[in-house]
Each structure stands twice: as structure tokens, then as C-alpha cells.
Amino acid sequence: MNSGANKKKLFISNLDFEVTSDQLRGLFEELGGCISVVVATDRETKRSKGFAFVEMESEDDAKKAIESLNNKVVNGRPMKVCEDRGKNAGPSAGSGEAGEGGQRRFEPLPSIQRMQLFKRRRKLDPFTEDPTKTVDYKDVAMLSKFVSERGRILSRRLTGLTAYNQRKVSKAIKRAQSLGLMAYTSIQGE
């Protein structure tokens, strides 16, 4: 018997839902050695999904099966027979998209697509720029820059502060609000 390297797996699609694995085995054994036949079935209904996998003993038997059984009408439907490309192969291997072993090749993006279209302006932390500045809960004018109009503390993404300074500012804001130096919200009720 041939070694495992010469085995060839075939994918059969567009099968009639009534075709059994024994019927398929009979069709393929006429053309050469057939190792296994697996008809895909639904787990719950146990009904065929309309495709199957057949493993042939040699590549020559597989090529004969493809040539003679492709588009052959079985139970009123022309079945399609081709080489199995595996789950992750995608479109046909001959389309030029696939590289070695059915894997997709890496294609670098053109320079226009790699370029960042809108540069985000970095907001710099005022406390790291000027080392003399400190976070103080009494400096309400400075703290109000880091609070929304609803009284919520702005995130680091919006303030541009470092994590350390963001914590210091949020503690100072909470302290100023609890002492009554800053309002919890700047929206005035009408």
C-alpha cells in the first residue's frame, strides 16, 4: 500500500441531500482505491449538508476521479469534485492570491494607505512642561480646565496628562468640590 504522503483528499460539493457515503464510495471505488468517505451532516437533524470529503489512495486516482466525476449528475444534481484545500485556504489556489501551501502572501499597503491622514495634535502635560507648576486644590481656575461643563473630570485622552498627574488633578478636583471651592456642575438651573 502507498505511504501517507501519496494520499489525496477530495472535496465534493453540490450533493443531493439523499446521497449516502456508501453510494459515494461505490462511485469513487470504480476509479481507484478509496480510503475514506465522509458526508458532512447536521448535528441536530442528522441530514446531509450537501458536501463530502473523499480520500483516495494516490494522486493519479484522485485526478481520474476529478476528471470523470466532476459535473456528473447524481440524483438530479451535478456534483462538483475538486482537491480539498483545507479550511483556511480561501479562494482557489490557482487564482494567484495564495502563496506556498495555500497560505496568503503578505502584501504591504501602498504608501498612501499607510500614511496617517489626520495627525492628532498631542496635548502636552502642563505640569511636565513647567516644573514650577504644581497641582493645588485651591487653584480653582487651573483645575476647571480639567472638568467638563457637567462637572465630570475629563479623561487622560482629552487632558493629555500623564497618569500620575491625572490622579493628582482628579484628587484635587474632588477635594475642591467637597470643600465647596468648586461647583459639582457648572450648568446653571433656570
Image (tube, rainbow, N blue to C red):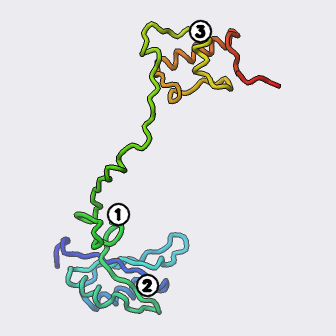
Residue that badge 2 annotates: 20
What residue do we see at 45% from left, 35% from top?
A: 120
Q: Is residue 149 above or below residue 97?
A: above
Q: CA distance from mark 2 to mark 1?
A: 27 Å
Q: Earlier in the sequence, mark 3 or mark 2?
A: 2
Q: Is residue 59 above or below residue 106?
A: below
Residue that badge 1 annotates: 88
Q: For residue 139, which numbered disc appears in the image? A: 3
Nearer to me, 91 or 53: 91
Q: Whole-percent x and y of residue 131?
A: 42, 9
Q: Earlier in the sequence, mark 2 or mark 1?
A: 2
Q: CA distance from mark 3 to mark 2?
A: 82 Å
Tell me the SS state at disc 1: loop
Q: CA distance from mark 1 to mark 3?
A: 61 Å
Q: Label 3 neighbourhood size at 10 Å, few (<14), some (14-19), many (20+)? A: some
What residue do we see at 48% from left, 17% from top?
A: 165
